[in-house]
Amino acid sequence: MLTSLYIKNYALIDELNVAFNNGLTIITGETGAGKSILLGGLSLVLGKRADLSQVKNTGEKCIIEAIFDIANYDLKSLFVTLDLDYDVQTIIRREILPSGKSRAFINDTPVTLESLVALSGYLIDIHSQHQTQQLTQDDYQFKVIDALAENKSNLETFSKELSTFKTLQKALESLKLSKAELIKEYDYNLFLSNELNEVNLEKINLEDLETQYEELNNVEIIGEKLSSTKAILNAEELGVVDQINATKQELSKIANFGKPYESLKERMVSIGIELDDILIELDNLEENLTTDPQELERINNTLQVVNNLFQKHSVSEIEDLIQIKNDLKLKIDNTESLDQSIIDKEEEIEKAIEKLNQTALKIHKKRKKIIPTFVSKLETLLSELGMPNAKFKVELESLDQFVKNGKDGLQFLFMANKGSSFNELKKSASGGELSRIMLAIKSILAEYIQLPSIMFDEIDTGVSGEISNKMGEIMKQMSQSMQVFTITHLPQIAAKGNSHFKVFKIDAEDVTHTQLKKLKEDERIVEIAQMLGGLDITDSAMAHAKQLLN
């Protein structure tokens, strides 16, 4: 409940500090006295955007502060979500600086307007003529029925399941898009992969292949040169072998004459041994040298294929081609495995739909069950509010698709008079009728859920007499379980209040100021008498005022 309101330097208010009690609080005052200013200030606390033009003295800061007792509101989890310190005496403050900037605080912690709005919706409901139009909107109609049907838990479950379902749908769509993209490349990737697989890249040693190719391609020259080399080494008289042997013999004759000569002889011996090995190697090479045109063609083809692949893929190493082959295989595997992934995701979606349908059915059944009770209560209250022929119908339609709060369509239909037909509420009810319907609905809601404090802004416009008296009784009944404010021009309603405040203007030094005063009992009598008969108070008006208060 709202326990106090402080306003400084706002519109026509210099400074105002007022405390409120539980029950029904009445606010009265002449037209133009400043009741709308009071509502405007309170609206700023609830998150309305600030405007420097609302500041009385633009050279000073404007402050509006409201204190709420939220002990019975079960809002601890919301404070955690908003990252705020929880206190049963919660203070909300708005400041408008001379620069035009505004600031908001909850329990002295700076907050955004979004956070302020998120919290204030649970604290106080300012009901104006504009908000009466909410009654014609689907969201509000669902809110009413679901509150009476005690669907809060089911709706929270449905919301989570719907979120999961939408996430799965997005994932499935992403998979299908990925598949569509990969399919465009699949055939080409498969061709490239097969082309690389045919070469058996892992078993290719490019250096060995090139060596073999050079040998087979030049076998005749190699044979000829091997033979001529052997001839040079083995030629009689001038052969290198004979010359080396002769050299060794000559050096042997002087080897004993000193270490330098012995070293030369040993070196020549080593050369002879190496030359013998060379001759043996030449014999082996010549003996094993063969002509193989088929092998030459095979190697040549392999080298051509590899070089073509190098050029196609803009690389120069076998390892690069192997990496490309592996990457292609991964793409191909992904394309082929996407079908299974899509099937798996579709199965998940089917299970999610099954859960959603089950929860939506629970929501639907509870709605359907409470509607007759709601209609009966509403028609009874409307009859008491001067609409004896008013008939209400709530149509609940099962839909083929999921919506944010289930799988239903909902429509409030209204018939004001006998002989007419049911039509949409926004087309068939006047402004005054909508106000009375809204009051009746709020009264019914108060029986089922803990509503925030509510402020009715001239909801009694256009009514009088016994109907206004009944409206007052309904608000009085509501105030037994919640805090109710009502701004009214009707004495019948004003007399129902537990407390009574008057908004009025005063002129001081050629400046108009708005003030708010809590009336004492005798002042209430005078105020109600004036509401009955005008400024010239008669004895009968005073007597009638006392009668109303009693």
Image: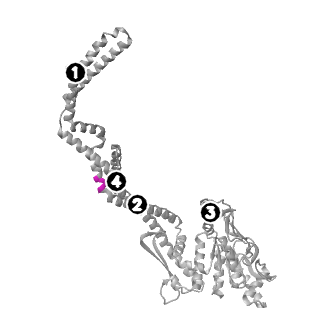
Identify the element where label 2 is drawn. Answer: helix
Q: Is residue 280 visible?
A: yes
Pointer 4 or 1: first along the chain = 1
Q: Which mark is residue 238?
A: 1
Pointer 3 or 4: first along the chain = 3
Question: Alpha carbon of mark 1 to alpha carbon of mark 3: how far?
Answer: 115 Å
| Image location of residue 151, percent across then percent down | 52, 67
Quadrant in which residue 49 is drawn: bottom right
Q: Label 3 sits on what residue type? A: Leu
278, 39: nearer the viewer: 278
Question: Alpha carbon of mark 4 to alpha carbon of mark 2: how far?
Answer: 14 Å
Pointer 2 or 3: first along the chain = 3
Residue at image mark 4 = 337
Q: Residues within 10 Å of mark 2 (few under 14, many from 20)?
A: few
Q: Residue furthest top?
A: 256
In the picture, measured across the screen, residue 191 lies left or right of residue 109, that is left
Question: Alpha carbon of mark 2 to alpha carbon of mark 3: how far?
Answer: 39 Å
In the picture, measured across the screen, residue 516 lies left or right of residue 478, that is right
Identify the element where label 4 is drawn. Answer: helix
Residue at image mark 2 = 174
Q: Is residue 450 magenta?
A: no
Pointer 2 or 1: first along the chain = 2
